[in-house]
Amino acid sequence: METAVSYNAKAENRQFFRMIFATVLPLLIQSVFTQSSNFVDQLLISSVGTEAIAAIGASNKLMTLYNGFLYGSCSGCAMFMAQYWGKKDYKSFQKIFGVLVTVTVAAGVFFSAIVILIPERLIHFFADDPLVVDLAVEYMRTVVLAYFLMSVIFPLEHMMRSMNKVKVTMIESIISVIVNCVISYILIYGKLGFPAMGVAGAAIGTVICRIVSLIILIVYIKVSGNVIFRDARNIFVYNLTFVKAFFKKALPLIANEMLWQLGTTIYFIIYGRAGTDALAAMSIMQTLQQLSKIFSGSFCGASAIIVGNEIGKGDVGRVNRFCKKFHAAAMVVGIVSGLAVLAVRPLMLYIYSIEGTEVGNYVSQCMLVLSLYILLNVNNSINVEGIFRSGGDTSYVTLMDMGSIWFVGMPWTLITGLLLHTNVVVIYFAYIVLELYKLPLGYFRFRSGKWLHMLYKETDQAQAVTGE
């Protein structure tokens, strides 16, 4: 009996790691290309001037808020889709996906309208420099089409991920990012006979990138005969059970992402009050922070897919064993990511051509803070971004995140930034403080087992009662 148990454990471990590599690697490659696109755009625009870096950083804050809404909506729906896919309940998958697309497209129209109507008012929240404001408005008015395109791309990408079709989104990202980099380079600097367009060129590159992404996804769906789209009419036949289920689980995540992004936006406003150099440094740090989380984010994203699919299969014991393996691996990922940040610190200063400058000093010191932040963040994110979300524990996730940024990080930022007027590096340290707050909350919640919800059972029971 012991030999059989040992063999089964080893077999399960091999299967676990095969699933990890098959899922993490495509997500990692996709993240590398996606974040590299932002990095390359920032590098290209850095030669235009500090004001241009600050302008794109400020204008992207609204995009970040919008991304937060889309991510909250899509991750709220993805937990259902992953479980339905594991259960092979394709009709329920279609119904919840239809609700998601309706919500995100409506949001895309709303956010696009705001950008078109009042861009100057939005930018004045983040910057006072007239040149920064003018450049930011120029960028926003050009990039606005990308807002609407994202409202369709995000749901399609999360649908593919829930089905573990991560290679599709990987290929989509590789092609679209390459297109973005090439187009941005040509238009920013005026190559191949085009006029030098500066920040507007970067915006056009972003729009074309989104168009390419959408085309690739639509072509794949058409060519592959995707089971969810075989009878696409059913997607938009709304069912009240699934509408209620979506909003019950997605609204906390939407609120969480929006309030989280709003909190980080307020951080950015405080940085902006410290001057253009501080704003430029924090714009760079925002990109470096995203780059530092490429591997860990892919790892946590893989955990959400795998755990969600396993929950749909109904083996709770196997789910818990997989989660414990993810926790052990998260520690290793965090250590490696933190050391990587320290290793590339001199290189980043050189690449951005900010060595010896005030901006460079800020970035260098903040990267020390970032190395510790990423270690803590991975261990929290494996719960918040992966395990708890796949288990439908959205209310607790929201309490963890909102509590950390509004009751821990925000007081720190306001006191150090607006009252004490400390160095921007001290203000940036708020990220570590909020991660320390979340660490014990995630640990005890997982141990309690209350995070695990069989979402497909809840909707099945609701339909049985209503007769839908």
Image (cartoon, rainbow, N blue to C red):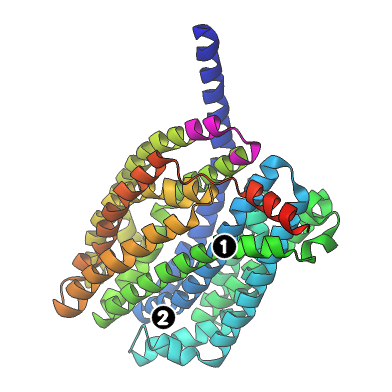
Q: Which mark is residue 55?
A: 2
Residue 352 visible in the picture? no
Q: Tag 1, which secondary structure?
A: helix
**Frontmost residue, 373 versus 444:** 444
In percent of width and height, residue 229 lies at 81, 56
Q: Amino acid at mark 2?
A: Ala
Q: Residue placed farthest to the front in the image? A: 465
Q: CA distance from mark 1 to mark 2?
A: 37 Å
Residue 217 left/right relative to 201: right
Residue 213 left/right relative to 135: right
In percent of width and height, residue 451 lies at 47, 46
Q: Which mark is residue 248?
A: 1
Q: Residue placed farthest to the left in the image? A: 420
Q: Please give the name of the residue rendered at 41% of the width and 80% of the height, measured from the top-left corner.
A: 55
Q: Please give the name of the residue rendered at 38% of the width and 47% of the height, measured from the top-left corner.
A: 378
Circle nearer the N terminus (1, 2): 2
Which of the 4 image quadrants contains residue 88?
A: top right
Q: Which mark is residue 275?
A: none
Q: Please give the name of the residue rendered at 57% of the width and 89% of the height, measured from the top-left corner.
A: 116
- Residue 313 located within the stretch drawn in magenta: yes
Q: Amino acid at mark 1?
A: Lys
- Range drawn in magenta: 311-322
Q: Give the prevailing secondary structure in the magenta stretch.
A: helix
In percent of width and height, residue 432 lies at 26, 56
Q: Is residue 200 above or below residue 155?
A: below
